[in-house]
Image (cartoon, rainbow, N blue to C red):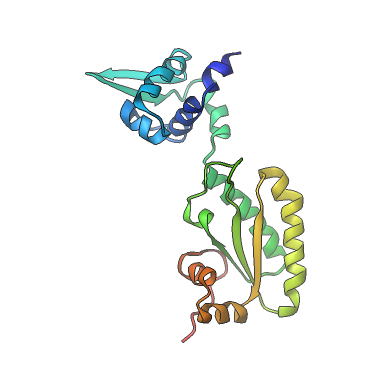
Amino acid sequence: MYLERILGTGTKVNVLNVLVNNPERSFIEKDLAVAAGAAVSEINRQMPDLVNSGLVKLERIGKNKIYTINKKHFLFVKLQGLFDNLNRIFMKAAKKILSYAVSLGVKTVLLVGSVAKGSVRGDITEAPSDIDMIFLVEKAGDKEQIYNEIISFVNRDISLEYGFICYPIVLTNKEYLERLKKGERFIVLAQAEGVELYGKKPRRFK
């Protein structure tokens, strides 16, 4: 099958991931090797299959080989879905969780960790990233119910669709500020680097 020749090695998969996610860019062979995490010699050995298939265009300028994805190839759109940037995928999941949490009445939702930084780990089989989110509510009595409902939603919808999970932290504004004042590392990072998906971060203590 032709897909075996196109996707048959880790190097080809990594190369296509780079090219498909940068469709307007051309890569000198050396730069492509760096971006794909492969040796130049391996890129040189693997690329003929991709070029011969028409999926990748090759241009020679002097001694340099320049590679570009062929956006008109019938596989390009399919590969865009397959190689969709993991940061975008995780953010889509986070926004689904956000929408559900807002329907429960949370006042603020903060996204923290690797997803907030746009640095989701690429290995979703051995060491997948997770989604770290903080949900702030008005009443302490609402915390347990909201936490359980978010966990239920994540297990029912998000984990099945995306294969990863969310660890929700549900706090009142008062608890958040108390932990911030105590210097709890996670809360300090959330205050400094967390992304406000909904509402506003509590005002810092004086």
Viewer-proximal residue, 13 or 153?
A: 13
Viewer-proximal residue, 59 or 183?
A: 183
Q: Residue furthest left?
A: 62
Q: Is residue 162 above or below residue 18?
A: below
Residue 122 position within the rendered picture, expressed as x and y whole percent measured from the top left: 52, 42
Q: Residue at x 37, y 30 (%)?
A: 33
Viewer-proximal residue, 203 or 190?
A: 190
Q: Residue at x 56, y 78 (%)?
A: 179
Q: Residue at x 59, y 46 (%)?
A: 128
Residue 78 position within the rendered picture, expressed as x and y whole percent measured from the top left: 57, 28
Question: How many discs appear?
Answer: 0
Q: Is residue 67 left or right of residue 163?
A: left
Viewer-proximal residue, 57 or 17?
A: 17
Residue 101 position within the rendered picture, expressed as x and y whole percent measured from the top left: 69, 63
Q: Is residue 135 left or right of residue 122?
A: right
Q: Residue furthest bottom?
A: 206
Q: Is residue 201 left or right of residue 48?
A: right
Q: Quadrant of the N terminus?
A: top right
Q: Is residue 173 above or below residue 66?
A: below
Q: Residue at x 47, y 55 (%)?
A: 117
Residue 147 position within the rendered picture, expressed as x and y whole percent measured from the top left: 72, 66
Q: Is residue 61 above or below residue 10?
A: above
